Image: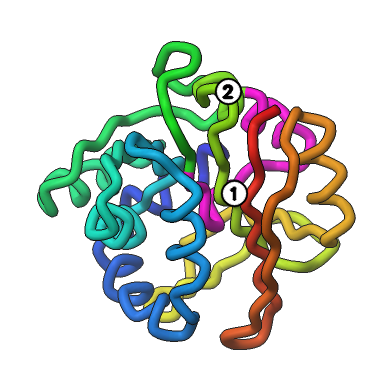
Amino acid sequence: MDAKTIQTYNQLAKEYDEETAPFWDLFPRTLIDTFTKLTKRKVLDVGSGPGRDALILKQGGLDIVCLDASETMVNLCKEKGLESILGDFNKIPFEDETFDGAWAYTSLLHVPKQTIGISLQEIRRVLKPGAVLGLGMIEGDTEGYKNTLKEIQENAPRWFSYYKKEELEKLLGEYGFEILYFETLKPRTKNYFFFIAKKL
């Protein structure tokens, strides 16, 4: 994950947590419900942030392990009673075939396009055969730094990589995933893509 983005999250984790807390109020729960139905017990939340999604998945009966590159985010998760590990998306600190599922909702947005293949390879590596990946991304065709936190616009750069649907379909296929489910939603100004894909 990009170093400047990690630094921003370390500095502004609490502000981010407060700003994004009502995020799922804008979405129908079909996304998380479908993922939960298709997933067995142990799930890695890749780029968990402050644990917003992890808490919902845990309430759905899943055994959640949070992974984030921001130490401050990891600590916020622990404060909420979540198991949380500090680690990079491109070098996930778990053995092969550890998890029944992986959840990566808008976290891989912060990975430059030239290295997202490494992240997908690592996620696939730690998944058991037939395990599922829940992947959330945002539609677009650009990448670069943006200051997007509402409360603090200056000195808060985060890297964003936006994708066309066809790009994501191709990437999932190239890195050994079969798409089982797709949904697109527009809660505000941008289209959000959500894929559930099975490890082949």
Mark 2 nearby-residue class (10 Å; few <14, some 14–19, many ≥20): some
Q: In terms of secondary structure, where does tag 2 sit?
A: strand
Q: Nearer the viewer, mark 1 or mark 2?
A: 2
For the N terminus, give its image quadrant. top right
Q: Residue at x 52, y 67 (%)?
A: 31
**Residue position marked by numbered label 1 in the rendering:** 110
Location of residue 150 by image quarter: bottom left
Q: Residue furthest top?
A: 95
Give the vertical position of 125 relative to 183 (above or below). above
Helix, strand, or loop for circle 1? helix
Closer-to-camera residue (151/104)? 104
Q: Is residue 89 left or right of residue 43?
A: right
Which is more N-terminal, label 2 or label 1? 1
Q: Is residue 55 left or right of residue 31?
A: left
| Within-10-Å neighbours for mark 1: few <14, some 14–19, many 20+ | many
What's drawn in magenta, residue-wise?
103-121
Quarter of the view holding residue 117: top right
Q: Main secondary structure of the magenta part?
A: helix
Residue 107 forms part of the magenta stretch? yes
* Residue that badge 2 annotates: 129
Magenta segment includes 181: no
Residue depicted at x 76% and y 40%: 172
Q: Is residue 180 above or below residue 99?
A: below
Indicate the amino acid at tag 2. Answer: Pro
Between residues 131 and 152, which one lies in front from this camera angle?
131
Pinpoint residue 176: horizontal percent, then vertical percent: 75, 29
